Image (spheres, helix red, strand yellow):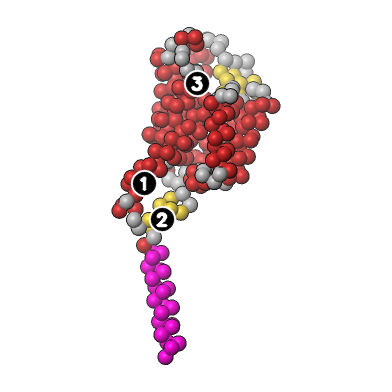
Amino acid sequence: MSIGLILLIIVSILIFAGVAERVLDRLRLSDKAAIAIIIAIVVSTIFIPNINITQNVSINIGGFVIPVALAIYLFIKADTGKERWRAVIAAVVAGAAIYGTQRYILPAEPEAQNIDPNYVYAILAAIIAYVLGRSRRGAFIAGVMGVVISDVIQMVLNSINNIPAPTRFGGAGGVDTTVIAGVVAVLLAEIVGEARERLQGGTAKKDLHFEKGHFVSTLGKDEKNSHDKNTKDERGDKDEK
């Protein structure tokens, strides 16, 4: 079984177990929506072949269309313009890094490689996506779009140099680099981000509570509760009199 399918299975288990609720909340997704997306990726990978756009360019529904559509949705749902810009910058940097790694670092001969280069690209995109994207949404957007951008760079250069090499966007479906990069980026963001929040939480967030994917001040709530309590006490005193 490929790493991509293993990741999708792990994510599905986490969703069913309720462990991924916090992550989904930050991604603006419900459990049902997340499961539906995973099923759509798997089913389209199995039953829908690559769709040819031109003679040398094709796309895959599960490996390209669905993750890119989700990335666009998350981009629209981003809380601030700063988060959007972080995601865009991270995607461009990740795309350039993947292309540079593919072109100049990894050996050209497949038999000389000890690991599938697609996993190297996915992990590289995920790390850059988290470091620059920071948020879970930004990490997913940058992870997915970074791989897409690297494919676009390759396609453009092939066209300029008249190289007839095919470009398959998300060609491997659910086990494609695009999907793996997005999933790994979010997992990395959650693990590292959660650890950082716990380490920095202490006194810095003692007056905050976590609500709908964000830290929210509890000061106003505490004051309101205190006011309500005092009001009830005053009413009780009047009743006794």
Marks counted in the figure total: 3
Q: What residue would you read off at disc 1?
A: 198
Q: Position of residue 188 (x, y in %)?
A: 43, 35
Q: Residues within 10 Å of mark 3 (few under 14, many from 20)?
A: some
The Cα atoms of the two marked residues, 3 and 1, are separated by 33 Å
Q: Which comes before the other along the chain, label 2 or label 3?
A: 3
Above or below, 236 against 99 in this view is below
Foreground disc of the pair 3, 1: 1
Circles 2, 1 touching at the beta carbon (< 8 Å): no
Q: What residue would you read off at disc 3?
A: 118
In this view, the residue farthest toward the right is 47
First to last magenta residue range: 220-241
Q: Is residue 46 left or right of residue 175?
A: right
Q: What residue would you read off at disc 2?
A: 209
56 vs 5, nearest the viewer: 5
Q: Secondary structure at mark 2?
A: strand
55 vs 46, nearest the viewer: 46
Foreground disc of the pair 2, 1: 1
Q: Is residue 226 magenta?
A: yes
Q: Main secondary structure of the magenta part?
A: helix
* Amino acid marked by disc 3: Asn
Q: Which comes before the other along the chain, label 3 or label 1?
A: 3
